[in-house]
Image: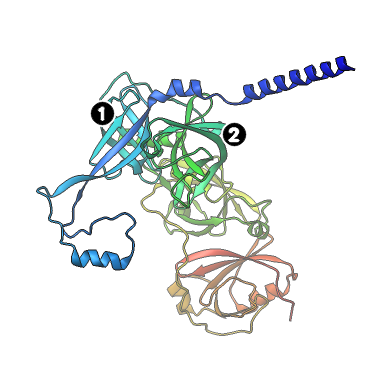
Amino acid sequence: MKAARTLTALWLAAFWATASAQAVRELPDFTRLVDDQGNAVVNISTTQAVRRSSGAVPQVPGMEDEEVLEFFRRFIPRQQPGPGPRQPEARSLGSGFIISADGYILTNAHVVEGADEINVRFTDKREFKAKVIGADRRTDIAVIKIEAAGLPAVRFGDPTKLKVGEWVVAIGSPFGFENTVTAGIVSAKGRSLPQENFVPFIQTDVAINPGNSGGPLFNMRGEVVGINSQIYSRTGGFMGLSFAIPIDVALDIQKQLREKGRVARGRIGVVIQEVTRDLATSFGLDRPRGALVNSVEKGSPADKAGVEATDIILSFDGKPVESSSDLPRIVGSTRPGSQSALDVWRKGQTRKLHITVAELQEDRIAASTAPGRSKPQAEAPANRLGIVLGELSAEQKKGLNLSHGLVVTEVRADAKADVRKGDVLLTMVHKGQHTELKSVEQFNKLLSGLDKNAVITLQVRRGESTAFVTISGLTDKG
């Protein structure tokens, strides 16, 4: 019996030793990666000369009370300016990495923006002055150059092959602590952020803090797959949400900056919105995907190619458009002047169109404007949507540049449609069928023929913008 217990104890010890060794083997080891690639990561500090105000209030940490501030403004003598009109004061810290042995470095545009002097510091304590070759604020990419040769350069990976859950490593200078290494996993890919339409961000849980900006994100093969650019934070520090610019996007931008000093982006002249599940049902689409065209700019490439409002763009230049946020990125990365094909979903079937891409001059985004002030020519009782409609006069149609449409004159408390007084309803979509709205009688007849649980979509003109509004369910027939 004693021998059996001894054998069992030995077996358990061997089992746990094997399991522990297996666990140790499965844990990632970043030491070789850091040894091989750490020397190619640099610390970037910038200095910006600022004009000192002669009437500046002394800066006291934590002094936020307005009464205290007013005391300083009124009773503390004003500071006299120094002998020089400008003095170097503003400093910022960031990171970067060497992309060629002759001294080209990639970083974030916001790291070097407005800098009068840029200093690059290596791990061996060498320091160089750098100059900006070019910067692109839309993607937050900048290329800077130092006069040096034989420098260690990073290797590039393919961010499209990254998998969610894969280990990644960041090296940078958070809060000025040079060559700090942090690690985590890829949390998501293709993230869209507010006001960032041209970058499909890589989301990670790698610890990124102020000073990491512009530093590289490595995969486990020691290849750069992204540039650490942004964090989501309520405190200003790391909270588990970090975003990196894919390196393929960054390399395309740096190539244009080095060759032409600027970035040329494509545009086609449409205003779009996301396709929800209800919209997909209304348009007869198999699932929510694509970019729904709200309006087409007159004379734009899309207009010339035959794109129409209510089209759903499913692919552009052979690339699928799964979300509306995909389209600006795909079009933006297309060279102006190039010929591209696009697939659109129109009235229940797919059509292929060909378009010549123009160059982006300014952003166009869907936005709500003040409701129109049109007065109806005639009124009708509230319909099954809980709204009262009127027909546009010939003069109103001419002023709005419309050939048809019904104006909303009243929205009842129990209204099913998310519309406002003054909106103009242009088109109704149901089960993929598009019907232009030309009279109140016609529209009410269409509604009367629908089931109580029907899902419909209305194309709504509000001011200078159009949008699609989906309604699920109608009131009982009167």
Residue nearer the viewer, 332 or 93: 93
Which amino acid, mark 2? Lys
Q: What SS does tag 1 mark? A: strand
Q: What SS does tag 2 mark? A: loop
Q: Which residue is mark 1?
A: 128
Q: Is residue 150 left or right of residue 322?
A: left
Q: How many marks?
A: 2
Colouring scheme applied when the structure was drawn: rainbow
CA separation in Å, label 1 and label 2:
37 Å
Residue 142, horizontal then vertical, whole percent: 34, 38
Q: Residues within 10 Å of mark 2 (few under 14, many from 20)?
A: few
Residue 152, horizontal then vertical, whole percent: 37, 21
Residue at image point 18% right, 51% down: 51
Residue 19 placement: quadrant: top right
Q: Residue furthest top?
A: 3
> In the figure, 280 relative to 73: above or below?
above
